[in-house]
Image: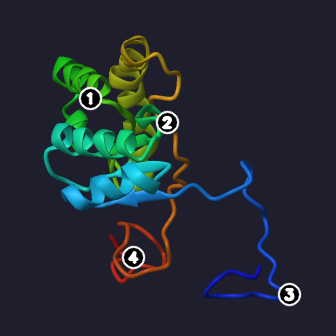
Amino acid sequence: FHGETVSFTEAISKPRPAAGSVPIVVGGHSPAAARRAGRIGDGYFPAKGEIGALIGEMRKSAESAGRDPDAIEVTWGGQDVLRGGEEALDEVGRLAELGVGRLVIPPLSYNPSQLRDLLAAFGESVISRAWPMARSRRGTSRWWAVTRWTPRCWRSPNRSAGCPHSRDASA
């Protein structure tokens, strides 16, 4: 690669991105981050803030840059969805109408023996009911992104109870 400010020779990156390039996901919860996502981002992931106002700012910036705002995937933390029940479904619907295309939920437990059952229950009570609803509101089939999280430690102290590498391995 030979660019304006940097050059690489004999550099190899594997595996190569499946889509031909690495998507640019802009993070940040300021209006400036939202505008940046609109101008150059393939995705936008604000960590906090007023999601409706931030998406509006991102959309306005994308249109000003001649880009399709619907092509920018918005990710939002799904903390409020963890309550479950009808409240969770209402929140999913509200987020879908705002333009959120992906929810990321925090681990439901750091205890590997509990995780499978908790994820199964969450999948049954929320995801299976929310997916068709969000899909019909946004016209997309990619609402819930399934991220594989293997219930094992990351070899760092106190990451998960019962981890053999944890300082608290006796728990």
In the image, residue 88 lies at what x, y percent?
A: 22, 26
Residue 77 visible in the current orientation = no
Which mark is on residue 10? 3
**Of callouts 2 and 3, the N-terminal one:** 3
CA gap, disc 4 and disc 3? 44 Å
CA gap, disc 1 and disc 2? 14 Å
Q: Secondary structure at mark 3?
A: loop
User: Circle 4 sits on which residue?
Assistant: 169
**Of callouts 4 and 2, the N-terminal one:** 2
The residue nearer to you, when weighing 50 against 135, is 50
- In the picture, the quarter occupied by the N terminus is bottom right
Is label 1 in contact with label 3 (beta carbons under 8 Å)? no
CA gap, disc 1 and disc 4? 44 Å
Residue at position x 40%, y 58% from top?
26
Placement of 49 over or under 66, stated as above or below: below
Residue at position x 35%, y 60% from top?
27
Amino acid type of the residue tagged 1 in the rendering = Leu
Which mark is on residue 71? 2
Amino acid type of the residue tagged 3 in the rendering = Glu
Task: State which quadrant residue 14 falls in.
Answer: bottom right
Say left or right for 41 vs 45.
right
Amino acid type of the residue tagged 2 in the rendering = Ala
The residue nearer to you, when weighing 160 against 126, is 126
Placement of 7 over or under 17, stated as above or below: below
Q: Secondary structure at mark 2?
A: helix
Is label 1 in contact with label 4 (beta carbons under 8 Å)? no
Q: Residues within 10 Å of mark 1 (few under 14, many from 20)?
A: some
User: Circle 1 sits on which residue?
Assistant: 98
Which of discs 4 and 2 lies nearer the camera? The answer is 2
